[in-house]
Image (tube, rainbow, N blue to C red):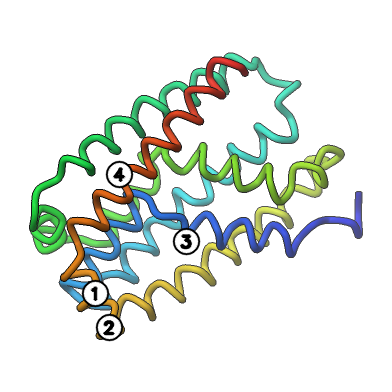
Amino acid sequence: MGAGLPLFEAFLAGAFVALTPGPAVLAFLGLGAERGRRAGAAFLTGHLVGDLLWATLALVAIVWTRALDPHVFQGLAAFCGVYLAWLGFKAVLSKPGQAAAEAVATARPLRRGLMFGLTNPKSYPVTLAIFTALLGGSVTALTPAEAPPLLAACIAGFMAADVFLVWLVGTPPLVKLYRKNQLWVVRGTGVLFLIFAADALRLAVTG
């Protein structure tokens, strides 16, 4: 494949994954709105470890799925679907002030971001969907030696999106808008989770 590596597409995929609304983005918005950019940046720094993990799994699922037992990916998709559905219903039924209270109670943003990144299976179906859309047709012939630069481009996309989010969360209009419409942002994202859950369960059933 060589010079044909879709590095720019991988960069965009990483940025889109980081910007897609989800539990981590909601936690980051609440944390940043209540405690400022520094706390938000610490959260996203920890979360970057999880981004790399799920990006690697998504890439493996696209490129080397024939080399692994398909039941592994079906099981992961099923777990993601159930977990997403639980998150979705929890968000839709959330009460006013709940997210803000959790954000203020977070004593260690870096560790919280790390745990969110590593334990949030929402990242897998979303990452897989975005990678398939942007990279699927270009990486079918990818070799193991070509995977590191592709992952590096993804990480660059994650970091670029994180820098943008840190800047955005400290702007007065966003802080005001989030605090005013927090409940509806959380509930709207919950609906999005339920849509992702349905798609993940579909993948689990169809393989």
Between 52 and 10, the one lying in front of the other is: 10
Separation (CA) of disc 2 from disc 3: 19 Å
Q: Which mark is residue 45?
A: none
Separation (CA) of disc 4 from disc 2: 23 Å
Residue position for label 4 = 190
- The amino acid type found where label 3 is placed reads Leu
Q: Mark 4 or mark 3, which is nearer to you?
A: 4
Residue position for label 2 = 173
> How far across and down, in percent of the image, does residue 207 sit?
62, 18
Q: Which mark is residue 19?
A: 3
Secondary structure found at label 4: helix
Secondary structure found at label 2: helix
User: Most extreme residue toward the bottom, as rendered?
Assistant: 172
**Image-based side of 64 in relation to 20, left or right:** right
Residue at image position (80%, 44%) is: 139
Residue at image position (20%, 78%) is: 176
Residue neighbourhood size for the residue with mark 4, other residues' Cα within 10 Å, grouped as few (<14), some (14–19), many (≥20):
many
Q: In the rendered structure, are the residues bearing label 4 and label 2 in contact, judged by CB atoms less than 8 Å apart?
A: no
**Image-based side of 68 in relation to 181, left or right:** right
Between 193 and 69, the one lying in front of the other is: 193
Q: In the rendered structure, are the residues bearing label 1 and label 2 in contact, judged by CB atoms less than 8 Å apart?
A: yes
Separation (CA) of disc 1 from disc 2: 6 Å
- The amino acid type found where label 4 is placed reads Gly
Between 59 and 173, the one lying in front of the other is: 173
N-terminal-most mark, 3 or 1: 3
Residue neighbourhood size for the residue with mark 2, other residues' Cα within 10 Å, grouped as few (<14), some (14–19), many (≥20):
few
N-terminal-most mark, 4 or 1: 1
Residue at image position (56%, 19%) is: 72
> How far across and down, in percent of the image, does residue 4 sit?
89, 56
- The amino acid type found where label 2 is placed reads Pro
Residue at image position (34%, 53%) is: 24
